[in-house]
Amino acid sequence: MTTTTAVDPIVVELVQGTVESARREMEQQIERTARSIIIRERRDYRAAVFDRHGNNVSSASSAAFVDPITQTFAPEDIHEGDVFLWNHPFRSAGGITHLPDLCLTQPVFWQGELEGYVQAFGHVLDIGGLTPGSIAIEATEVFQEGLLIPPVKLYAGGVRNEALVATILANTRFPEELRGDLDAEALALRVGVRRLSELLARVGRETVRAAFEACLERCALALRERVVARIPEGTAAFEDFVELNGAAPAEERRFIRLRVALRREGARLVFDFRGTDRQAQAAINIAGTPKYYAKYLMSIFRPLVGEVILNSGALRVLEVELEEGSVLQARPPAASAYRAVTLFRIPDLCMGVLAKAMGGWGAGGADTRSPWRYSGVVDGQRFLMHDGVGGGAGGTPDHDGPDAIGGDVNSTSVPVEFLEATYPVRVERYGLARGSGGAGKYRGGQGIHKEVRLLAPGTLWIMNDRQLLQPWGVAGGRAGEGTTFGLNLGTPEEVRIDYKATRAPVKAGDLLTIRTPGGGGWGDPLERDPELVRHDLEQGAIDDATARDIYGVVLVDGAVDVAATSARRAALAATRGPLQMIDRGERFRALAARGEITLTTRDDEPPITSRG
C-alpha cells in the first residue's frame, strides 16, 4: 500500500519520534511499576504502537500483533476504553509464543474513529502449570503449562472485568506479583493512548495516517536498498541444532535440526525453513507463522540500515516459508513453555546463512541466554528465583564480539545485591569466563563465570543450550566455548550438568558454578593484529598456548617479536589445511565422528580466501 497524501519529511520525523518516545515511555512505566523479578529486574517486557490497520509503526522487536483482536472481535465490538488480554500461543497469530507472556492491547480512538493500537506484554513470574515459573521443559502439551487465555476483554469501556482478574490470580503461585504486573501493563497502555491522542490533536488525522505509511515504506526501502541489493542471486543453506538431551522422557532425540535456505527474489528476501525437524515431545516448540518470523528476523539487519526504524514495513521485503508440524510451526497442543531455546537460535541461524550467502559477512555464533531457576520454601514461604546469565557475542568483520551481554532485547542481568537480599543465595564469583571467546581476526566475546552458594534446600531447573555443542565461528574463525553447569566442582560431591535438568534437588550449602558460552570468532586468527593478541593475553582473554599456537604470535619480554611472529604464522598456515566458512568446534566434531549428529549442508562452502 502507498499513501495518496503528501506529507512533509520533517513531519514524518516528528511523528516517528513521537511514536518511539511513546513506546519508550510505556516500557519505562512497566519497568518502574511491575512486581516480578523477570520484568522489573531482567526487563523481559515490550511495548509497541500500531496504526489502525494493525501495522507496527514503532521499533518492532519481540512485540506481538494486533491480529488476535481483529480475528476474534468484529469492528463494532471494539470500543474506546477496551483493553484486550491474551497469552494463548495458538490464538495469537504467532505473536505470543508461551503462556507467561501476558499481552495487553488497547485501541486508540480519536474523535470517534479508530486510529491505532498500543500494546504491552511482559513475562510474568508464574501462570500455573507443572512447575513454579510455568516453564516445564518436560511438558508434552500446552495444557500442562498453565492458564490458557484466548483474546478476551480485561477492560470493557474502561471497566475492569474483576471476575476475569480473580480467575487469573487463582491460577498462579504468586498472585501479588502477577496482580502488580497486570496493573503495570494496563497503566502503560494509558500512557500510550494519551501520547498518540496528543499527536493526533497536534497534526491531524490525515497527516498521522500518511506519516505512518511513510514510516512503513521508509523501512521497506532501506531494506531493499541497503540489504537486498548486497545479497547475490542464488540460494545458500545453513543449519544448527537445539539440544534435547535430558529435556523430556517422551523425547528420544538428542538434537533438533533447524535448517534455513536463503534466496533472493528480485527485491525480496525469502527465508525457507522447510527441512527443519518435526515438533518435539518437549516444551521447545513455537506456534509461529510466516508473518511472525519475518517480523522477528528484521532485527539481524540493524547494522546495515543505520538510523532507520525497523517496523512492519519489513514485511514488504522479507518472506518466510515454513512446514506445518515442524518445531517452528507446531500444531496444537504442542508444548512451548521453553520455546526460548529455539526462538533465540533463529537470528543466529539466519546470520549463518547470510554469512554463507555473502562470503563471510555477519557475526560468529553466540548463545547469550543461560537461564536457571531455583525454588524452595524458607520460613514457610515459597520462593522462586529466576536468573538469566548472559554470554559472549560473535566476532564480526570489523570488531570483536562484546563480552557478557544478555540475549533478550533490552535485557539486563539481575543485580547481585537484589538476588542476595531477596533469595537464599550468596554470589561468590561473578566475572568473565576467561578464554571462552572463539579465536579469529576478530575474536568472539567472553561469556560469564558465576558461582552461587545455595543457602536453602530446594530444586534447580537448568534449561539452557550449548551444553553439548558450541557457538560456531565464521569465515575462518574458531568456535566459542560451550556451556558449563556444575554443582560442587572439585569436591567429592561434584556433579556436572551437561543436560537440561528439571527438578534437580540441591542441599543447603551447595555451590552452583556457571560458565556461559563465548561467541564464535570471525576471520583467520593468523590475521589478527599481533598487538591485539598481546593485549588479549595481558587481559586474560587468552592464554600463552592460544597466543602461540592459534594466533601464531611470539612474545619476548612481553613485546611482540615481529620477525618471529611472521615466521610462526607462515609455518602454522602451511600445516593447518584449508579454513572452513563455518567452524562448529571440537564438541561437534566428536559427536559427528561417533555418528551422533549429522549435517545436510556443507560448512566448507563457499571457500575461504585470504583477506590480508
Image (cartoon, rainbow, N blue to C red):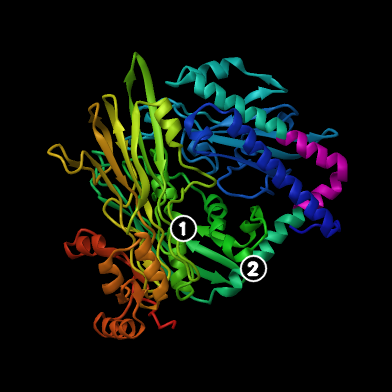
Q: Residue reaching furthest left?
A: 492
Q: Residue at x 67, y 59 (%)?
A: 308
At label 1, which amino acid type do we have?
A: Pro
Give the residue pinned by disc 1. Answer: 402
Q: Which secondary structure type mostly characterizes the magenta part of the structure? A: helix
| Rendered location of residue 489, percent (x, y) | 20, 42
Would you say residue 134 is visible in this rendering? no
Toward which corner of the image does residue 403 lie, by quadrant?
bottom left
At label 2, which amino acid type do we have?
A: Arg
The magenta stretch is 192-212
Crowdedness near tag 2: few (<14), some (14–19) or many (≥20) residues, C-alpha within 10 Å:
many
Q: Secondary structure at mark 2?
A: helix
| Rendered location of residue 391, percent (x, y) | 40, 51
Instruction: State left or right for residue 184 relative to residue 200.
Output: left
Give the residue pinned by disc 2. Answer: 224
Q: Nearer the viewer, residue 441 or 496?
A: 441
Q: Is residue 163 above or below residue 529?
A: above
Q: Residue at x 64, y 53 (%)?
A: 312
The C terminus: image quadrant: bottom left
Q: Is residue 130 magenta?
A: no
